[in-house]
Amino acid sequence: PHNLCVHDNLSVFISILIARHALSINDYIIVSVQSIIASTPKERLDPSASRSNPSLSRLRGS
């Protein structure tokens, strides 16, 4: 519950900044996508990693 409240408040704040042109939506998208990619485990980004690690294949259902 606490995390959801923080996320809601942050999304409202970012929306206000974009609406007031204090933050470009293009810049926001670039930064957020880079952040998501950086926080994604490398095994999920590299499809060949699941072939070399059978436990990952079982998790994915292959």
Image (cartoon, grey):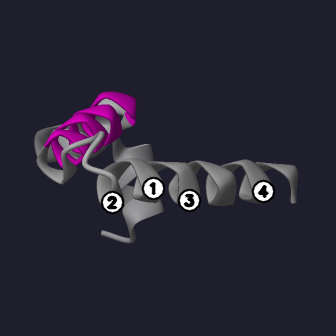
Tell me which label, 2 or 3, sits earlier in the chain. 3
Q: Which residues are magenta?
A: 27-39
Q: Amino acid at mark 4?
A: Cys
Which label sits in the foreground, 4 or 3?
A: 3
Secondary structure under tag 4 reads helix
Q: CA distance from mark 1 to mark 3?
A: 6 Å
Q: Amino acid at mark 1?
A: Ile
* CB-based contact (under 8 Å), mark 2 and mark 3: no
* CB-based contact (under 8 Å), mark 1 and mark 2: yes
Which label sits in the foreground, 2 or 3?
A: 2
Q: Please state the horizontal and vertical placement of residue 13, each as a whole percent of the image.
A: 54, 50
Tell me which label, 4 or 1, sits earlier in the chain. 4
Residue identifier under label 2: 19
Q: CA distance from mark 4 to mark 3?
A: 11 Å
Secondary structure under tag 1 reads helix
Total labels drawn: 4
Q: Judge left or right: residue 53 versus residue 31.
A: right
Label 3: few (<14), some (14–19) or many (≥20) C-alpha neighbours in 10 Å: few
Question: Which secondary structure class fits the magenta region best?
Answer: helix
Q: Residue furthest front?
A: 20
Label 4: few (<14), some (14–19) or many (≥20) C-alpha neighbours in 10 Å: few
**Which residue is painted at 39% across and 32% down in the image?**
39
Residue identifier under label 3: 12
Tell me which label, 4 or 3, sits earlier in the chain. 4
Q: Judge left or right: residue 6 versus residue 41.
A: right
Residue identifier under label 1: 16
**Which residue is painted at 15% across and 47% down in the image?**
47
- Tag on residue 5? 4
Q: CA distance from mark 1 to mark 2?
A: 5 Å
**Which residue is painted at 45% across and 56% down in the image?**
16
